[in-house]
Every structure is written in structure tokens, then in C-alpha cells.
Image (tube, helix red, strand yellow):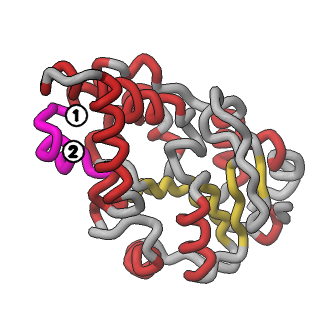
């Protein structure tokens, strides 16, 4: 699945890959609709239906990931609402061990996320994962989401990586397809982004449920 002596750098997604997507799913599907319903004085069911439609309209675009966009659209302080339930932010099992092993191996570790800067700051502050990364890139700084192949061109101008020797791990199939179009050789899909959700059926990419599956051999192949 992963031949470590052919990999110099590891690019990692955040939500669903390193962090449990349960926080995000609960926040957008339950907590925001509840707050919106109270604010607009409508039923929770009506709020969920309305927001599901509005989410769908911008899915896969930068606006979908933008807290400022949703604050304007919904008339709610989305960043503040996230802080109210930030106790639900959790790191997936085996992530810390994997990051430590990667660091010890001498490989470059890069976080590449669609998360808004405010979300990124909240989650890195809550989890204390920031110290493991050699670089952190947010799609909002590039003006394009990772789903757009041009995002990788812009990233490559700042992060001079060899796409033949870089592993990229994400839970989004659309993002992985975009990375494949850019030319990444090594791609992995996380099949259980939400610990309380089902395992995703993925056939287009090699898969893992957690990082313990690719740790064997890492320690033996230091750079």
C-alpha cells in the first residue's frame, strides 16, 4: 500500500483524516440548524431542510468551507458557535503515534486543509497538533478549494514537492481525484472519517480506516 523508501513527504488533510468528522457533522447538521431555528423562530425540521438545500448549493466550493460566508448568509456568528461545542473536537486514534513516527523518520509533514482560518486556529489550539507540521496550508489563502486541480498548482509554487515521492491522505474522494489529476502518485482515502458514521465504500483509491495500517515499516525506512 505504501512503500516508505519511495516517499519523502506526507501531505495530510485535517477534518475526517486527522480529526474526527463527528464534530463537523454534528455542528453543521444539528447545532447550526438548531441555532438558526431559534433565531428565525421556525421549527428545527424546517431549519434543517432549508440549510441542507443551501449547503448543497455551494458544496465543493470555497464558500462551503468559509465561516464568514455562512455568518453573512445565516445571520449567525459561526465562529462563536463552533467555540460553544469545541469540546467535541477529537483526534482520531493512532494519529499522534503516526505523526511522531513520521517526524522521527525525517519526512516532511504538511497539513493541507480546506478549513477556514478561524476553524484551523480553533482546532489546532484545541488538539495541540500544530507542532508536528513543517508547514500548514489553508485553501482560503489560495482562493481555491482542494477540489480544484488549480489549487495544487498554486500550492506547488510555495511548497516545492515531488509529486512522485509525496503521499497525500484525505477522506474526500473529490479532493483525492483532484490530487490525482495533478499527478500525485501516492494517494490514500480514509474510509471512516466520522467515528460514529458508517465505513465508506471506496473503490477508486487505496484505503485505510486508521493510520496504524501504514505504520509498519515506517521506522525501518528513515530518511
Which callout, 1 or 2, points at the residue further toward the start of the chain?
A: 2
User: Which residue is at the front of the view, 127 or 197?
Assistant: 197
Q: Quadrant of residue 192?
A: top right
Query: Residue drawn at (85%, 61%), measured in percent from left and top?
Result: 1
Q: Secondary structure beneath disc 1?
A: helix
Residue position for label 1: 78
Q: Secondary structure beneath disc 2?
A: helix
Task: Tell me how far mark 1 sits from mark 2, CA to CA.
Answer: 7 Å
Q: Quadrant of residue 18?
A: top right
- Would residue 138 be visible to someone looking at this image? no
User: Which residue is at the front of the view, 34 or 91?
Assistant: 34
Residue position for label 2: 70
Query: Residue drawn at (47%, 78%), measured in percent from left and top?
Result: 149
Magenta stretch: give its range. 65-78
The relative height of residue 44 versus residue 3 in the rendered view (above or below) is above
Residue 77: % across, % down: 16, 32
User: Which residue is at the front of the view, 101 or 147?
Assistant: 147
The relative height of residue 212 versus residue 166 in the rendered view (above or below) is above
How packed mark 2 is, by other alpha carbons closer than 10 Å (few <14, some 14-19, many 20 or more), is some
- Would residue 116 be visible to someone looking at this image? yes
Q: Is residue 206 left or right of residue 149?
A: right
Do the residues bearing badges 1 and 2 touch, measured as CB atoms within 8 Å? yes
Residue 99: % across, % down: 64, 42
The relative height of residue 5 versus residue 194 in the rendered view (above or below) is below
Amino acid at each position: 500500500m505504501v512503500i516508505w523508501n519511495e516517499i519523502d513527504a506526507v501531505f495530510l488533510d485535517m477534518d475526517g483524516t486527522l480529526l474526527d468528522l463527528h464534530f463537523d457533522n454534528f455542528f453543521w447538521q444539528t447545532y447550526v440548524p438548531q441555532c438558526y431555528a431559534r433565531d428565525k423562530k421556525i421549527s428545527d425540521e424546517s431549519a434543517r431542510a432549508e440549510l441542507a438545500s443551501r449547503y448543497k448549493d455551494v458544496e465543493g466550493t470555497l464558500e462551503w468551507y468559509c465561516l464568514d460566508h455562512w455568518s453573512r448568509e445565516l445571520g449567525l456568528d459561526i465562529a462563536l458557535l463552533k467555540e460553544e461545542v469545541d469540546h467535541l473536537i477529537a483526534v482520531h486514534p493512532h494519529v499522534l503515534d503516526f505523526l511522531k513516527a513520521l517526524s522521527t523518520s525525517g519526512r516532511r509533514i504538511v497539513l493541507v486543509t480546506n478549513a477556514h482560518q478561524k476553524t484551523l486556529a480553533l482546532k489546532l489550539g484545541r488538539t495541540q497538533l500544530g507542532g508536528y507540521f513543517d508547514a500548514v496550508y489553508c485553501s482560503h489563502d489560495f482562493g481555491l478549494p482542494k477540489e480544484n486541480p488549480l489549487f495544487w498548482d498554486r500550492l506547488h509554487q510555495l511548497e516545492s514537492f515531488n509529486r512522485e515521492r509525496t503521499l497525500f491522505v484525505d477522506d474526500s474522494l473529490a479532493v483525492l481525484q483532484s490530487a490525482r489529476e495533478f499527478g500525485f502518485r501516492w494517494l490514500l482515502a480514509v474510509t471512516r472519517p466520522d467515528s460514529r458514521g458508517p465505513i465508506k465504500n471506496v473503490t477508486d483509491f487505496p484505503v485505510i480506516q486508521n493510520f496504524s495500517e501504514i505504520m509498519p515499516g515506517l521506522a525501518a525506512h528513515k530518511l
